[in-house]
Amino acid sequence: MSARVLLLFCVLTPYCAGACLPPAPALDKLKAYLVYQNGLGKNEPRLDTFNVLPMGDWLFFQLETAPTGDAAERTPVYAYRPKAEIVMLSCRPQDWQNCVREYARSAEGREAVRERSSAQTTVQTCQFTLSVPPWMPSPDNAAKRKVAAEILGEIRKYLAVRHPKTIWLRDFSLDDPDIWMYITTSAYSGLQGCSFDRARIPHCNWHLFGQTPQDWLRKQIMARPYRLYPPPTGRR
């Protein structure tokens, strides 16, 4: 289902004066991100309600659905900007708008955001509800294998992995924002992350995993293994 097929509610702001609908590219990217995260969690269908704050070419999506437990004192806010990856921020619910303003200022320069921002501490926002389905990998077809081959080429070129023994991916959807991989050579074995965009060449912006436990990551990959090397490529 397209992200444009939404249950949508408009709330009072000039941003909502026409159609209370954020741009389709923003909604598609947000939905892909949420579906991917759903696949790492309960992977059940759900409805998420968001407040939207536009700021120049930024859109900030604040999850109105109340978190539970220890997370209740923070609210997730998803930052969207054209041609950039979704970034998840963690803000206090009572001042999340100030939180995202500070983020935007640090990201693009304080003066640019100050000139565009309202003098008000709080502004009215547009609200909508988005259906988030369970995550599923893309079919193991020619289109997916083509992208997989291109990722293998990027690994060889940009990571300088010339003679791999095995490369396993966590099985993926072509809409996923991130792909995890487990690479072994005669000299080492390691984990690598790819911030992924099928429309971008190269597809991957490379990253590591910080303090995330390596054993947990490896188990996640090998629970849904997709063999990238050696041939034949595909789901196992």
Image (spheres, rainbow, N blue to C red):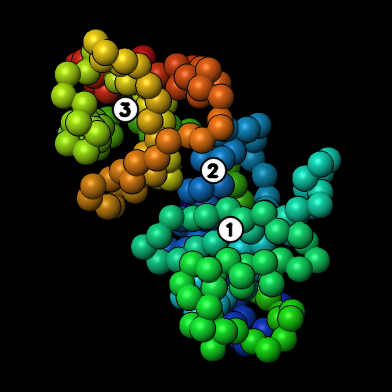
Residue type, label 3: Asp
Residue under the point 76% across and 53% down: 74
Residue 91 to residue 55: above or below: above
Q: Quadrant of residue 129?
A: bottom right
Indicate the position of residue 121 as horizontal and vertical percent values. Answer: 74, 81
Measured in 3D between alpha carbons, the distance from the residue under mark 1 to the one under mark 2, in whole angstroms, is 14 Å
Residue under the point 58% across and 53% down: 88
Q: Residues within 10 Å of mark 1 (few under 14, many from 20)?
A: many
Q: Secondary structure at mark 1?
A: strand
Indicate the position of residue 1 as horizontal and vertical percent values. Answer: 49, 50
Residue under the point 67% across and 62% down: 62
- Residue 78 is tagged as 1
| CB within 8 Å, label 1 to label 2 | no
Residue under the point 24% across and 34% down: 159
Q: Is residue 138 left or right of residue 5?
A: left
| CB within 8 Å, label 3 to label 1 | no
Q: Residues within 10 Å of mark 3 (few under 14, many from 20)?
A: some
Measured in 3D between alpha carbons, the distance from the residue under mark 3 to the one under mark 1, in whole angstroms, is 30 Å
Q: Residue under label 2, please give it.
A: 35
Indicate the position of residue 213 as horizontal and vertical percent values. Answer: 56, 24
Measured in 3D between alpha carbons, the distance from the residue under mark 3 to the one under mark 2, in whole angstroms, is 19 Å
Residue type, label 2: Val
Q: Residues within 10 Å of mark 2 (few under 14, many from 20)?
A: many
User: N-terminal of the two: label 3 or label 1?
Assistant: 1
Image quarter hosting the C terminus: top left
Q: Secondary structure at mark 2?
A: helix
How many numbered discs, if any?
3
User: N-terminal of the two: label 3 or label 2?
Assistant: 2
Residue type, label 1: Tyr
- Residue 140 is tagged as 3
Q: Secondary structure at mark 3?
A: loop
Point out the frontmost of discs 3 and 1: 1
